[in-house]
Amino acid sequence: MPIEKCLKVAALASAALVAAAAPSRSDDLIKPRLDVNSAFCAGTGDCAVSVFAGPRLDTHMVSVFGISNFVAPTRYQYGNSWITGGTFSRRLLSVGPVDFEGEVGAGKRWGSLGEGEGWIALYGRWTWFPWNEYVRTTVAVSTGLTLATGNPQYEIRREGVKGAYLLHYLSPEITFAPPKSQWEGFLRLHHRSGGGDFIGDTSIFKGASGGAQYLVSGIRYRF
């Protein structure tokens, strides 16, 4: 068989396989999760509650993730403060392997910092990994707002800036769970800042740059 024919047959076979694997309708790919029947989380698995605790992490976020001057976990610097907290979250939309979730949470700092925190955020969560049939794994990142009850000197890191009670909430996390379990464990970098390293100074955050962040671990129940 001429090579041109072989290539055509291979191309047609590949196209047929892709067509067979693809969703038959767009709503098989994009699935809204909030409707009249499931708004109150009655056994849908779209809602979750969690509790967590952990120490203040003084190593800069950009170093934690290797964006600048990577620091290995064994060399992280911790402060003499810790946080406890809890959240409620709701899965709103699924687009392929990506879930979008709304979250509200509250926490209390202890030790050298004693403020309370409340936040509201939107999470994007990647849910597909090749080993999920053994250990269900997800990674997620948030954008949102966090409001603290105080404005400690620790968060005022730049001369001439008074800090801000309201800051940006950017808190990446990774989760692990048995394949069929409603329970999961997670590790999260609970981070609030003015976002100066990424979005520059903004008037809403009064020019604040850094903020308190905590490396927390917790458990979550989905229902």
Image (spheres, rainbow, N blue to C red):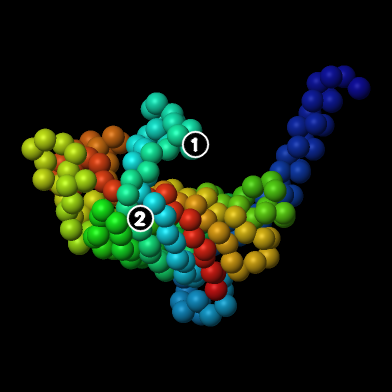
Contact (Cβ within 8 Å) of mark 2 with mark 1: no
Quarter the N terminus occupies: top right
Horizontal side, residue 43 vs residue 10: left or right:
left
Amino acid at the residue labelled 2? Trp
Q: Position of residue 151 (x, y in %)?
A: 17, 53
Question: With respect to residue 211, does 146 lie above or below?
Answer: below
Horizontal side, residue 145 vs residue 16: left or right:
left
* Residue drawn at (38%, 64%) of the image: 85
> What is the spatial separation of the Cα atoms under label 2 and label 1, in whole angstroms?
19 Å
* Residue drawn at (33%, 63%) of the image: 107
Quarter the C terminus occupies: bottom right
Closer to the camera in the image, 75 or 221: 75
Q: Residues within 10 Å of mark 1 (few under 14, many from 20)?
A: few
Which secondary structure lies at badge 1?
Answer: helix
Tell me, for residue 82, which label it has, or none. Answer: 2
Q: Position of residue 143 (x, y in %)?
A: 35, 51
Q: Position of residue 201 (x, y in %)?
A: 19, 38
Q: Position of residue 92 (x, y in %)?
A: 46, 64
Earlier in the chain: of badge 2 and badge 1, it is: 1
- Please name the residue that numbered disc 1 is placed on: 74
* Residue drawn at (42%, 49%) of the image: 215
Image quadrant where residue 64 sits: top left
Question: With respect to residue 18, does 84 lie above or below?
Answer: below
Image quadrant where residue 87 sits: bottom left
Amino acid at the residue labelled 1? Thr
| Residue 92 shows in this picture | no
| Residue 42 shows in this picture | yes
Question: With respect to residue 36, does 64 lie above or below?
Answer: above
